[in-house]
Amino acid sequence: MKHLPLGAKQRLSTYRKISIASWNHPRDPSTYSWLDLPVEAADAFLKTLPTPRPSLTHYIAKIVAHCLEEHPALNHVIRGGNLYRRGQTDVFITTLLKGETGYDLSGFVLRNVPQKDLNTLAHESKIEAEKLKDGTDAEMARVAELTQKLPAWVLRIVMRFQHFFHFTLNTSLRAFGLPDDRFGSVMISNFGPLGLETGLVPLSPYCRCPLIIGIGRPRPLPIVRDGAVVVAECVNISFTFDHRYADGAHGAQMMKKLQKVFLNPNRFPEIFQNEATNATLSSNPDPA
């Protein structure tokens, strides 16, 4: 039984092979970038959708997933010093929990995001977040139980074995209570509700996720519109890339497409692919 679905083994360019050989997982191949984007068009679009109404996080998740499908250079996993194309595009959404030991960071994964509409993503997110908060997510409860029982130095050894079986051997460990491919293709962390306007999220060695996106709290910023400086509500979207997987050119392609779709959702009905959504798009003018 496979731990995660994979496509064909990829041929490596000279720099990609040197890059993979130069860094471990990861210490530290982080490359950072960010965008400040007006949220007017996104907010107007999301308000037209039925309940459960998707959030800005779902909106960005859907666009990012499309970008990874269109520019898949970042949608890989490193195994044994080689890049392998992921068989599907999954998005991990971080979730802040409050328990007996205080605040804790967890999350859930949305599978096959390009194949789902925004309302489906919102519905699945609501269910998964509630399971995390009330402790009924069996997989995460098992992980938390093991983590709490083991001292840090033993946990480090256990995680190395888990990495070896999950990624080097590509073997499922579900029989031991460990979930398959828990983090997927990209992680999204919305820290705006905490009052943070900007932030750069670090890569995590244990998740093998080459792209992490941070979403800040929207705030007014000066922008140029039709040749004049105006004030608009903007959101900061930060990107942390793993340089072993891709170059700046790959990241730039993805960020350009993300910006284009984010600012003009009504021009890309095929991305949000939902009959109700498409009907809304066709009956409403582009707010941008």
Image (cartoon, rainbow, N blue to C red):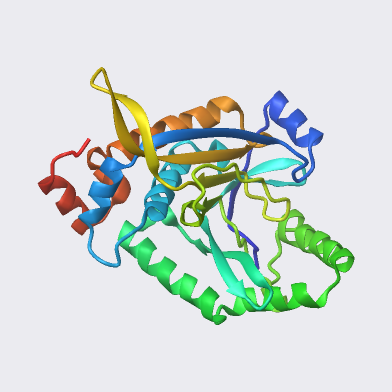
Q: Quadrant of the C terminus?
A: top left
Residue beneath the point at 33% across and 57% down? 118
Q: How many marks?
A: 0
Quarter location, residue 39: top left
- In this rendered view, identify the residue nearer to me: 242 or 35: 35
The x, y position of residue 236, in whole percent, is 46, 40
| Residue in view at x 71 percent, y 25 percent | 15
Q: On screen, 23 above or below 120?
A: above
In the picture shown, does residue 247 fall above or below 196? above
Look at the image and tell me whether residue 72 can be seen.
yes
The residue under the point 43% across, 51% down is 61
Q: In terms of depth relative to the viewer, which is nearer, 240 or 199?
A: 199
In percent of width and height, residue 91 lies at 50, 55
Report which quarter residue 176 is drawn in. Answer: bottom right
**Residue 108's spot in the image, x, y percent?**
53, 65
Give the residue at the far left of this rendering.
283
Looking at the image, which is closer to me, 186 or 215?
215
Residue 26 against residue 128 in the figure, above or below? above
> On the rendered image, what quadrant is the N terminus found in?
bottom right
Kindly tell me whether residue 179 is visible in this rendering.
no
Q: Residue at x 65, y 63 (%)?
A: 3
Give the side of residue 163 with respect to residue 287, left or right: right
Residue 204 coordinates in the image, percent (x, y): 69, 51
